[in-house]
Image (spheres, rainbow, N blue to C red):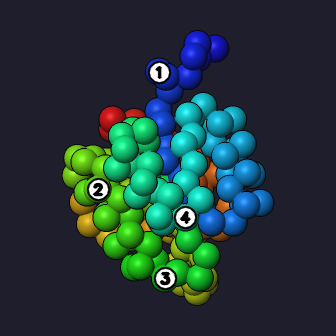
Amino acid sequence: MYGDGLDRPTILFIEEDDDTRFIMKRNLQREGYRVLLAVDEQDALERVGDGHANAHLLLVNLVGKAPEEMLTFGRTVRRHGHYDGWTPLVVMAEKYGKDVEGTDVNVCDNDWITYLEEPNQLNNLLARLLHRH
């Protein structure tokens, strides 16, 4: 269907939890994405710094970190990897109130926080952001 996979949109997924990382990778691949994994912040910086992690979108989910911390980190990865400012950054919020549940918030430019309520929400956001690419 996709040949060698290089023609598919690529997501750099930064996730510390082993179980979540595996499940998310499988789900993203089912949606047609090529997935590059980083197990933590240091791993992500090393991967983008050596040029092995060219991605169309950065997806960040760091356990115990506030969305603002993850945004700051994602922006650091984007700069360190010499991505352009249009490379989307999506942060998956971990804890949040009912007032934001199910929303995707564009915090600035191409930086997003998603407050997941149902599985298709992330897929819809990623498809929308990568369609621009």
19 to the left or right of 83:
right
Mark 4 and mark 1 lie on one chain; the one further toward the N terminus is: 1
Marks 4/1: CA–CA distance: 26 Å
Depth check: give the residue in front, 74 or 28: 74
Q: Residues within 10 Å of mark 2 (few under 14, many from 20)?
A: some
The local secondary structure at tag 2 comes to helix
Q: Amino acid at mark 4?
A: Asp
User: Which residue lies at the image location 39% right of the left edge and 79% below the top edge?
Assistant: 68
Examine the rendered structure and indicate whether residue 24 appears above or below residue 127: below
Residue 94's quadrant in the figure?
bottom right
Q: Position of residue 101 (x, y in %)?
A: 58, 75
The picture places residue 130, in percent across and down from the top left corner, at: 41, 40
Residue displayed at 56% across by 71% down: 62
Instruction: Examine the image and state in which quarter residue 40 appears.
Output: bottom right
* Circle 1 residues within 10 Å: few <14, some 14–19, many ≥20: few
Q: Give the label, 2 or 1, closer to the camera.
A: 2
What's the mark number on residue 7?
1
Mark 2 or 3 closer to N-term? 3
Look at label 3 and name its amino acid. Ala
Q: Are marks 3 and 4 in contact (CB under 8 Å)?
A: no
State the CA–CA distance, disc 2 to disc 1: 24 Å
Of marks 4 and 1, the one in the foreground: 4
Which residue bears the numbered disc 4? 40
State the SS at label 1. loop
Q: CA distance from mark 2 to mark 3?
A: 21 Å
> Regarding mark 3 in the picture, which secondary structure is present there?
loop
Which mark, by number, is residue 80?
2
Dot 4 alpha-carbon crowd within 10 angstroms: few under 14, some 14 to 19, many 20 or more: some
Q: Is residue 50 visible?
A: yes
Mark drawn on residue 66: 3
Question: Would residue 39 be found to the left or right of residue 26 on screen?
Answer: left
Q: Position of residue 26 (x, y in %)?
A: 72, 42
